[in-house]
Amino acid sequence: LANVYGSMAPNEAAPLVGRLEDEIALALVERMPGKRMGQILSLMDQERAIELTKSLTDKKNLSD
């Protein structure tokens, strides 16, 4: 699914990813190349993008 969302235009993927449950959204975006992740996050609702970014950071810190 990450490939499917990653191959969409960022302006199409952003609202869809933004509406997914946290666990699913995180699983998708963390499997995308950094550039695509950034494009999608930049087009999402600002608060939602911040939530996902914090969750990604927390998850990365736990795995270090």
Image: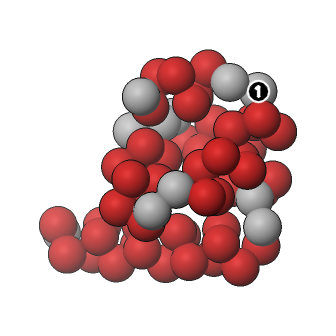
| The N terminus - image quarter | top left
Q: Position of residue 24 (x, y in %)?
A: 38, 53
Residue at 65%, 72% (x, y): give it: 48
Name the residue: 75% across, 59% down.
Answer: 44
Q: Nearer the viewer, residue 61 or 45?
A: 45
| Residue 38 visible (yes or no) | no
- Give the x, y percent position of residue 9: 76, 27
Choose top left, top right, bottom left or bottom right for residue 21.
bottom left
Q: Looking at the picture, how far across and down is residue 58, in whole percent? A: 34, 78
Left or right, 45 with respect to 49, comes to: right
Q: Give amino acid for label 1.
A: Ala
Q: Residue at x 30, y 67 (%)?
A: 60
The quarter of the image holding the C terminus is bottom left
Q: Secondary structure at mark 1?
A: loop
Look at mark 1 in the image and give the residue it sits on.
9
Can you name the residue that lies furthest to the left here? Answer: 63
Q: Nearest the camera: 48 or 32?
A: 48
